[in-house]
Image (cartoon, rainbow, N blue to C red):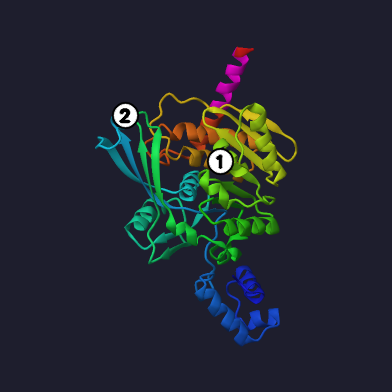
Amino acid sequence: MLSENERKVLNQINHDPFLSQAVIAKQLNLSRSTVAGIISSLIQKQYIQGRAYIVHPTSDIYCIGAMNVDRIYQLEEELILSTSNPVTSSVTIGGVARNIAENLGRLEQSVSLLSLAGDDADYQMIKEQSQAFVKFDHVKLITEAVTSSYTAILDPQGQMQVAFADMAICEAMDHHWIEEYTAILQTAKLLVADLNIQKQAVETLIQLAANHQIPLIMIPVSGPKMKHLPHQLKGISWLIVNQDESEAYFQQKVKNEADFIQLAQQWLERGVENILMTRGTDTTLYANQEGQLEFYQPPINPKVVDVTGAGDSYAAGIIYGLAKGYAPQDAIYLGMANAYQTVQSPSTVRKDLNAQQLEHEAQQLYQNQNNQKERVK
């Protein structure tokens, strides 16, 4: 975490990297030796790269959370327990924050990943396959840890049967870790975080986003990870969550449509500015603090290959729309279109993704759904 004087010096260097220590000292009414010590500390903390005080490059969007290696096994026949089952297998890279970051990078956004990894072969694989789209300047390596991994078993139709996640390294994604990057994060256009980070880290991010008026988009990972979300949520601009995760957080089951709508209202009461609550192929509910409430029907895809990464691509499409300044409705259609195309791909992030194509796909989806509504009338 930076001291007040460290922040002041870093701000001066951000404005003019070629200022001498003497000039900085005079401007801030500090001694030259004090400024020299502060600059040395900033270099050690990796906020600047040394002479001529070159500041680490920043990004418009920071994705904060997990990166891991995905190992996918698809059954050739229905699963039989207590025996060997024939499968086809693949190894890809994943992690909610990393998946969203790659989607955004392919959509021509300036994006950095803030994450932790082991100094191992899995990390090298992730970096090699991601760095064309995502900046890795702020990924910290922990030599005694291993990079997190995710293993999924899919049925012959591509639906997940069971999954295993080794995410122990995420326990180090705490508020101390976030505080190391405060000066960098407060320059962001958008902050995106998954709930692999710890509860105090989430609280720190919410406060940072509120203090600096930076939109913060939270992406839950699973029902059990909802315990990482604090009680006070004012400062979260968007929460993209599913029904199961919402039920886990509020400890109540949805029995009917009224219960589903009530869950959305409870998110708003906690302070979330915009809530988007999904439930598979059933209608999605969007609501906000201005009283707007709308349902969206996700398109049914008859060509599902692999659903892994669908939720991340959905979130990424929405975040892309928000970064472009689009209205919520347009952003949601971008998310639905991206997810629809992603499940037809064997990759967690589809390789043919680009901004122009996604915008075309979203427009096509919007027109198709409107045409269907007209026919029903």
Q: Residue at x 61, y 53 (%)?
A: 189
The x and y percentages for residue 267 are 67, 42
In the rendered image, the vertical position of residue 4 relative to residue 341, given as above or below: below
**Residue 324 in view of the camera:** no
Label 2 CA crowd tier, 10 Å (few <14, some 14–19, many 20+): few
Residue matched to label 1: 245
Q: Secondary structure at mark 1?
A: helix
Q: Quadrant of the N terminus?
A: bottom right
Q: Quadrant of the C terminus?
A: top right
The x and y percentages for residue 61 are 56, 52
Residue type, mark 1 in image: Glu
Left or right for 51, reference 88: right
The x and y percentages for residue 33 are 60, 87
Label 1 CA crowd tier, 10 Å (few <14, some 14–19, many 20+): many
| Farthest right residue in view | 290
The x and y percentages for residue 148 are 40, 54
Whether residue 294 is in magenta: the answer is no
Q: Secondary structure at mark 2?
A: loop
Q: Residue at x 35, y 38 (%)?
A: 153
Majority SS type along the magenta span: helix
Residue type, mark 2 in image: Glu
Which residues fall within the magenta stretch? 365-375
Residue matched to label 2: 78
